[in-house]
């Protein structure tokens, strides 16, 4: 409405100025005819304004219809919807980028109430870091589960209930984020996917020239000069005046000619030393870890498998479980990992989640140098801590853990609840403090983490296993169950075979809660032995 008033006022100012110059229009038909033409100009301006507003309104309606349909689907099963990593990435992208585009579209013409409300709400929207993080998660899933870009783009992931696809623009954004981190391997993969979709006729605001520009450079950085030259020629066919493309063409031809003549230069040597392939992870067991996440890798021999049993367990004659023993299953022998079935009810799970949700914060790890808690890229989840005094359910869960493990939980850490988001993971780590981390749990004053109890509070459609790379064990989430293992030998020495990881969640939402028991208070419950590895 403000814009309309401006358009109406400006021509009238001209008209009034003309009237003041000539005055007494009624006294001259000639002068009055000028008013007719002024009115016609006003009407033309008005029609142009209406047409422009109708075009904008149609665009806004399309936005509203798209978001309405998407929101209707998403809110029926929020966790299931966001459990699909593509949906999670696109949510970050929509709220960080697309809603801002909508704001720019309607800023001049929508009511002040909407703009002010949107401005207020935007401070709670995801930012660039969120969008980048979601993109990294998609790339992490791509690597861990050996997924090609076509599979991810078409949303053909296992166990999905809400199929979602990536546009050429989405693929371009993923490639661009990889490019900003000098990850030319993934830049090539995602720019090629964007190009394939554009070549297939997909309508997009992304220009092929822009995609080819990134793609050719990413290919060159990996040492494939011939392919980089071919892509650059294609770019110049679309835009012959492209300055960087013309420069690169001459440079690539020059380097290739020198190599063909068996000449050497620092440039050609530098290019030749680059190799194609994904960036190497910082952990030596990365390959083994990812194979286990995919369900591959080391498997237990039949002889060892025959020693694994399921049983009814009374918690070492615990009064609570003598009459109603719980179901226990052996998951692994060394280290011994056991699973308890039907050990936490759906009602208890919902209460734990209800208490934790308002307090979920980015999960932290112990800095081995400072001993302090800090965030890290290798742990992608949010967590909260719950104390026994806060609700009877938490106290009851703690008591249950004590009865079944025989360990004193009074010196244990509070119940930690964690929720893994898009591509959520925790790369290989130890739960206990090593000798080079003497201050890991110094502030607690309860010694090292003797054991780990881990509840699975949700099923996960795909991914999300707990794996032990040192021994090849893989434990999969199953709602209502819990797994338990000792981190320390009875001598107090750390069991390095318990190094474990939470695999990235491919599809679904993973909820867990864990209890870390400490050494203090266990002196008579689990006596120390003289043998270091007993």
Image: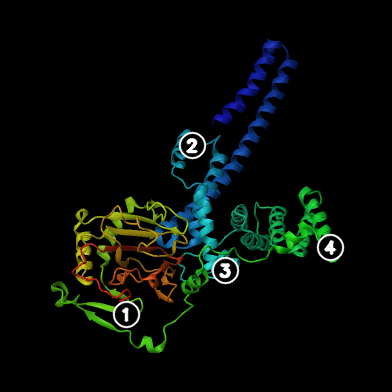
Residue 251: percent from the left, percent from the top?
80, 55
Question: On the image, which quarter does residue 449 sit in?
Answer: bottom left
- For the point 48% across and 37% down, the residue is 115
- Report whether residue 65 is seen: no
Q: Estimate the spatial distance between the alpha carbons at disc 1 and disc 4, rounded to whole Å.
A: 64 Å
> 35 or 393: which is nearer to us?
393
Which residue corresponds to mark 1?
330
> 305 or 455: which is nearer to us?
305
The first of marks 1 and 4 along the sequence is: 4
Q: Is residue 430 left or right of residue 448?
A: right
Which residue corresponds to mark 4?
263
Q: Is residue 453 left or right of residue 37?
A: left
Which residue corresponds to mark 2?
115
- Report whether residue 263 is seen: yes
Q: Are marks 3 and 2 in contact (CB under 8 Å)?
A: no
Q: Estimate the spatial distance between the alpha carbons at disc 3 and disc 2, rounded to whole Å.
A: 39 Å
The first of marks 1 and 3 along the sequence is: 3
Q: Secondary structure at mark 3?
A: helix
């Amino acid at each position: 409405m403000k814009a309309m008033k401006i358009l109406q006022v400006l021509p009238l100012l001209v008209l009034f100025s003309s009237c003041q110059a000539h005055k007494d229009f009624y006294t001259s038909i000639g002068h009055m005819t000028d008013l007719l033409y002024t009115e016609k100009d006003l009407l033309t301006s008005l029609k142009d304004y209406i047409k422009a507003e109708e075009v904008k309104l149609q665009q806004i309606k399309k936005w509203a219809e798209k978001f309405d349909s998407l929101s209707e689907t998403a809110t029926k099963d929020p966790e299931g919807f966001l459990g699909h990593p593509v949906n999670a990435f696109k949510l970050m992208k929509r709220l960080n980028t697309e809603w801002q585009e909508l704001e720019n579209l309607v800023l001049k013409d929508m009511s002040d109430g909407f703009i002010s409300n949107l401005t207020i709400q935007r401070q709670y929207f995801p930012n660039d870091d969120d969008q980048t993080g979601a993109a990294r998660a998609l790339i992490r899933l791509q690597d861990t589960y050996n997924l090609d870009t076509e599979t991810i783009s078409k949303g053909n992931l296992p166990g999905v209930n809400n199929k979602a696809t990536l546009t050429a623009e989405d693929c371009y954004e993923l490639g661009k984020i990889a490019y900003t981190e000098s990850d030319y391997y993934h830049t090539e993969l995602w720019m090629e996917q964007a190009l394939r979709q554009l070549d297939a006729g997909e309508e997009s605001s992304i220009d092929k020239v822009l995609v080819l520009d990134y793609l050719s450079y990413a290919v060159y950085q990996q040492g494939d000069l011939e392919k980089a030259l071919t892509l650059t020629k294609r770019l110049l066919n679309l835009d012959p005046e492209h300055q960087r493309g013309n420069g690169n063409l001459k440079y690539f031809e020059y380097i290739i000619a020198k190599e063909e003549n068996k000449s050497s230069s620092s440039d050609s040597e530098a290019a030749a030393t680059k190799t194609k392939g994904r960036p190497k992870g910082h952990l030596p067991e990365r390959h083994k870890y990812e194979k286990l996440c995919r369900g591959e890798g080391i498997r237990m021999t039949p002889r060892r498998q025959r020693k694994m049993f399921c049983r009814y367990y009374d918690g070492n004659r615990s009064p609570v479980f003598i009459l109603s023993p719980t179901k226990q299953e052996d998951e692994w022998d060394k280290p011994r990992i056991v699973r308890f079935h039907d050990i936490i009810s759906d009602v208890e799970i919902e209460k734990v989640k209800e208490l934790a949700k308002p307090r979920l914060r980015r999960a932290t790890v112990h800095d081995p140098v400072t001993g302090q808690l800090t965030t890290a890229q290798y742990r992608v989840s949010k967590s909260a801590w719950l104390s026994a005094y806060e609700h009877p359910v938490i106290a009851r869960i703690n008591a249950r853990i004590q009865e079944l493990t025989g360990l004193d939980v009074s010196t244990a850490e509070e119940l930690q609840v964690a929720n893994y988001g898009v591509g959520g993971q925790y790369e290989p780590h130890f739960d206990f403090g090593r000798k080079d981390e003497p201050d890991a749990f110094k502030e607690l004053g309860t010694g090292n983490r003797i054991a780990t109890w881990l509840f699975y509070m949700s099923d996960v459609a795909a991914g999300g296993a707990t794996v032990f790379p040192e021994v090849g064990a893989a434990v999969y989430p199953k709602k209502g169950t819990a797994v338990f293992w000792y981190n320390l030998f009875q001598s107090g020495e750390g069991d390095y075979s318990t190094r474990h990881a939470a695999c990235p969640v491919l599809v679904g939402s993973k909820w867990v809660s864990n209890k870390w028991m400490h050494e203090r208070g266990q002196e008579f419950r689990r006596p120390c032995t003289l043998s270091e590895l007993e």
